[in-house]
Amino acid sequence: MIETLFPNVNWDKMLEATYETLYMTAISTVATFIIGLAIGILLFLTSPHQLWANKLVYFLTGSLVNIFRSIPFIVLIILLIPITKLMLGTIRGVNAALPALIIGAAPFYARLVLIALREVDKGVIEAARSMGAKTSTIIMKVLVPESMPALISGITVTAIALVGYTAMAGIIGAGGLGNAAFIDGFQRSRPDVTLMATIIILIIVFIIQFIGDFITNRVDKR
C-alpha cells in the first residue's frame, strides 16, 4: 500500500535524511539552549534596576541579539559560508550547517529567556538579596528554577523553528529532509518524495511539541 502511494521514495535515503535532520536539530538545540540562556541572563542582569545594571553592556548585547534575529536564516547561511569553511573546511554536510543554525537560533531564544526572567516575582529576588545570596546563587536557585516552565516552552518553540531551519539548510547542501524534499523530490519531479519528507518533518514537530508540553507541565508548580 505505502509503496503504491510513494513509488519513488528510497526508504534507506529517507531514513538517512531523517537521521540527519534529527542530528542537526538535537545538536543545535542543546547549543542554543546553553548559549541563549547565558545571553538572556546577561541581558536580564545588566538591564536597568537589576544586579549588574550596565547600560553599555545591555545596549551592546541587545543590539547584537536584535541584529542576528533580524537576518533571514537563508541569508545568514550565505554570510557565514567563509567562517564555516574556515572552521570546518567545507560548507556541505550536516556539521557545516550547525554554526548557522546555532547563531540563527541563539539570539531568538535569548529574547525568550529575557521575557521569562522578567516574569519572575521581584519580591523573591529581593528576598534572596536581603539574605546575602551571591549573584550566582540567585541565578541558579531563584531565576532559573522560577522561570523553568517558560524556559522549557521557549526552547520547545526554538527547537521547532530549528527543524524549519534545517530544511532550509538542506536546500544548499546540508542534507536532511529539506535536501530530500528539494533535490530528490522537487527538482526530479517526484512529488511523493517531497510529500513524505514533509510528513516526517510534521511528525518530528509534533513529537517535539508533545515532549516540550509534557516537561513544562511536570515542572510547572503553579
Image (cartoon, helix red, strand yellow):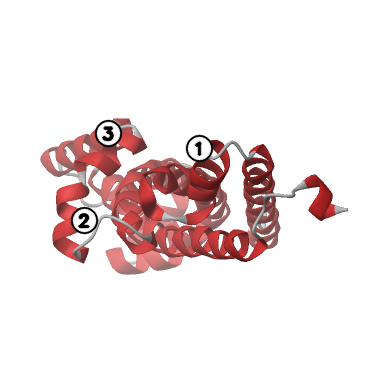
Is residue 77 left or right of 220 when viewed as pictured?
left
The crowd level at tag 1 (other Cα within 10 Å; few <14, some 14-19, many 20+) is few
Q: Residue at x 15, y 39 (%)?
A: 60
Marks 1/2: CA distance? 26 Å
Which labelled disc corresponds to residue 34? none
Is residue 220 left or right of 46 when viewed as pictured?
right
Q: Residue at x 30, y 58 (%)?
A: 96
Q: Residue at x 14, y 44 (%)?
A: 57
Question: What residue sits right under mark 3 in the picture?
Answer: 66
Amino acid at the residue labelled 2: Thr
Q: Earlier in the sequence, mark 1 or mark 2?
A: 2
2 or 134, which lies in front? 2
Badge nearest the viewer, 3 or 2: 2
Whether residue 100 is visible to the viewer of this picture, yes or no, is yes
Question: What residue sits right under mark 2 in the picture?
Answer: 84
Q: Position of residue 146 (x, y in %)?
A: 52, 56
Q: Position of residue 176 (x, y in %)?
A: 49, 55
Q: Residue furthest right?
A: 1
Marks 1/3: CA distance? 35 Å
Question: What residue sits right under mark 1 in the picture?
Answer: 187
206 or 193, which lies in front? 193
Amino acid at the residue labelled 3: Asn
Badge nearest the viewer, 1 or 2: 1
91 or 67, which lies in front? 91
Amino acid at the residue labelled 1: Gln
